[in-house]
Image: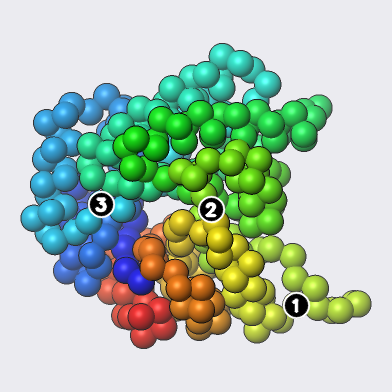
């Protein structure tokens, strides 16, 4: 397994500085949130994108790809019955794929909970079919670029659509395209239902073992993986014991990236990056 970190961890510096900081902490991959690049990331010039790719290479990093695809955007949605909005979303996804390819990336993590949740009155099977059609068309654009869309289940506090790995796998099977696969996130998996017996709430060990079970069940579909914690910090900086998950990844012979994604930036980006990497090296390597 290879270790990467999401670039928004280092939002206090320019892109070249982000690359240097990630490499200094030990990572060999960088995952990029488009909104960190520009207010209009798909409008960046080819020259700027070449500079970004060169900055990553100069730091000894591989650009993993993109995530937070629709963050800080307006007018895009995966499941809406509005044909015009879905068409705009597909066009934006295609342009993001071109951006990803220009920077040397091969993955696009499709999370974006606010731009996929169903509103009152929307029919679930219809919304499911709309999502499948849009993602299939996006994957068809991604295929010749060598890019895989990795669809991310997220917890019910964030969205009401694709809240478990099993539901997301059903969508992937409906899409039926090899360039549309599964992304798993430790924070999100921590919120998946766990059976602990009548009248009992699951303990931490049961939740951690359930995460490992999700990984094993999802083996045939898994393309990418985020290591984090429900406390919004890095791996090893909260209650989750990543040991069972790491063993499950080794058991299924996962050879992709383990990418650190955090949402809280104290005690500072460089400290978070260093501590997270040290934990990954101890537990996941």
Q: Residue furthest left?
A: 58
For residue 55, say whether it is visible.
Answer: yes
Whole-percent x and y of residue 129? 69, 31
Q: Badge 2, how many Cα within 10 Å: few under 14, some, many 20+?
A: many
Q: In screen coordinates, is 145 left or right of 52? A: right
Q: Position of residue 223 (x, y in %)?
A: 46, 56
- Residues packed near mark 1 inside 10 Å, few (<14), some (14 to 19) or many (20 plus): some
Q: Is residue 20 left or right of residue 126?
A: left
Q: Measured along the vertical axis of the image, is residue 80 above or below residue 216?
A: above
Q: CA distance from mark 2 to mark 1?
A: 26 Å
Label 3: which residue? 63
Q: How many marks?
A: 3
Residue furthest top in the image = 84
Depth check, mark 3 against mark 1: the one in front is 3
- Relative placement, left or right, of 130 versus 108 is right
Identify the image quadrant of residue 174: top right
Secondary element under disc 2, as helix, strand or loop, is: strand
Q: Which residue is mark 2?
A: 182
Q: Name the image quarter holding residue 3.
A: bottom left
| Rendered view: 45 above or below 235 | above
Q: In this orientation, which residue lies closer to the viewer: 19 or 126?
A: 126
Q: Earlier in the sequence, mark 2 or mark 1?
A: 2
Residue identifier under label 1: 202
Quick one: 28 or 265, which is closer to the camera? Answer: 28
Q: Name the secondary structure under disc 3.
A: strand
Q: Position of residue 38 (x, y in %)?
A: 27, 33
């Amino acid at each position: 397994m290879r270790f990467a970190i999401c670039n928004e961890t280092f939002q206090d510096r320019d892109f070249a500085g982000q690359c240097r900081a990630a490499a200094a902490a030990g990572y060999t991959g960088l995952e990029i949130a488009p909104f960190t690049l520009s207010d209009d990331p798909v409008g960046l010039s080819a020259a700027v994108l070449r500079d970004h790719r060169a900055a990553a290479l100069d730091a000894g990093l591989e650009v993993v790809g993109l995530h937070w695809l629709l963050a800080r955007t307006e007018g895009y949605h995966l499941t809406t019955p509005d044909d015009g909005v879905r068409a705009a979303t597909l066009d934006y996804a295609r342009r993001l794929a071109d951006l990803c390819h220009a920077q040397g990336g091969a993955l696009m993590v499709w999370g974006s909970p606010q731009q996929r949740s169903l509103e009152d009155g929307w029919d679930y099977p219809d919304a499911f079919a709309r999502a499948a059609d849009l993602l299939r068309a996006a994957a068809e654009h991604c295929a010749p670029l060598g890019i895989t869309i990795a669809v991310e289940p997220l917890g019910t506090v964030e969205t009401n659509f694709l809240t478990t790995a099993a539901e997301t796998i059903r969508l992937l099977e409906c899409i039926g395209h090899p360039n549309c696969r599964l992304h798993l996130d430790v924070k999100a998996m921590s919120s998946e239902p766990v059976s602990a017996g009548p009248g009992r709430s699951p303990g931490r060990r049961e939740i951690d073992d359930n995460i490992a079970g999700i990984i094993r069940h999802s083996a045939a579909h898994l393309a990418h993986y985020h290591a984090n914690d429900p406390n919004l910090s890095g791996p090893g900086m909260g209650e989750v014991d990543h040991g069972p998950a790491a063993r499950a990844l080794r058991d299924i012979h996962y050879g992709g990236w383990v990418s650190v994604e955090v949402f809280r930036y104290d005690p500072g980006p460089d400290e978070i990056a260093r501590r997270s990497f040290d934990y990954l090296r101890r537990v996941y390597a």
